[in-house]
Amino acid sequence: MQVTQNSQAELGLSITEATTRAQIIGATIATIADHGYARTTFARIKERAGLSSTRLISYHFTNKAGLMQAVLSTVVETKTQYLQERSTGIDPGDRAANLRAYLETSVAFLRDYPQCVRVLVEMAAHTDDHDGWSMTGVMLSQVRTGFVQRQLEQGRREGAFGDISAEVVALSIAHAVDGVAAAYAADPSIDLDRYGRELADLFERATAPR
């Protein structure tokens, strides 16, 4: 995954600093995707990023926690922007249409950003890492169910959805996407667009007012 210096612009860094920081984040994402979280070391990141020393990583991120915070924030931002781009033209108040877009996008994300998906899985499995970022679990929970649960709750209040448990539906959606991810890992030839459409159809029926 290519991380651009523009994603670091709000930090007030020089062009060189922003470029190096983005380079390190991109190398860390690729290393986690290839080797797993537990085997991702500063030495491996240095080699992947083509840095002269691991001290450059410490300079930009202080420690592992700071680096993992930046990595997870970048991955989450990437997924959020992907959803926004694929939701262009949809009325924000059309809860059903936005739920469909969320489901179809979550499935398409598996194909279009496999490294990000791998990072999310790996970081979820290592939230107990004492050297990692302490808020990893909280952010992952928001990514996994928090956003869609809030949308479901709002839609239920507005009458766009039926008398549902937003918490249960949000968790069911997360498990459904996990199932598609497992199927895709086992057989990359499956039609993810069809999976996305059919999941969207399923949850559209399940959440419709009665």
Image (spheres, rainbow, N blue to C red):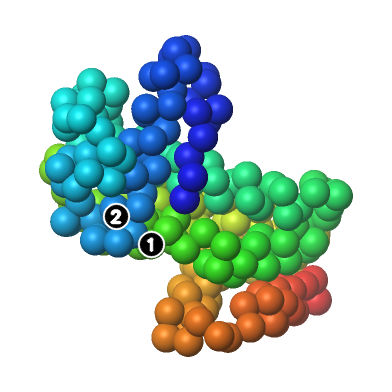
Q: Distance between the residues labelled 1 and 2?
A: 8 Å
Query: Picture quarter containing residue 153?
Result: bottom right
Q: Residue at (42%, 58%) from the top-left corner? A: 115
Q: Name the one closer to the observer, 34 or 98.
A: 34
Picture disc at residue 149: none
Q: In this view, does 158 lie above or below 131?
A: below
Q: Say which amino acid is labelled 2.
A: Ile
Q: What element carries label 1?
A: helix
- Kind of residue indicated by mark 1: Arg
Given residues 4 and 133, the one toward you in this image is 4
**Helix or strand or loop: what does disc 2 sit on?**
helix
N-terminal of the pair, mark 1 or mark 2, is: 2
Residue 162 in which image quadrant: bottom right
Mark 1 lies on residue: 118
Q: Percent x, y for residue 51?
A: 25, 33
Q: Quarter holding the C terminus?
A: bottom right
Residue 10 place in picture, x, y as percent: 52, 19
Residue position marked by numbered label 2 in the rendering: 32
Crowding near the residue tagged with mark 1, few <14, some 14–19, many ≥20 C-alpha atoms within 10 Å: some
Kindly indicate the quadrant of the structure image that contains residue 135: top left
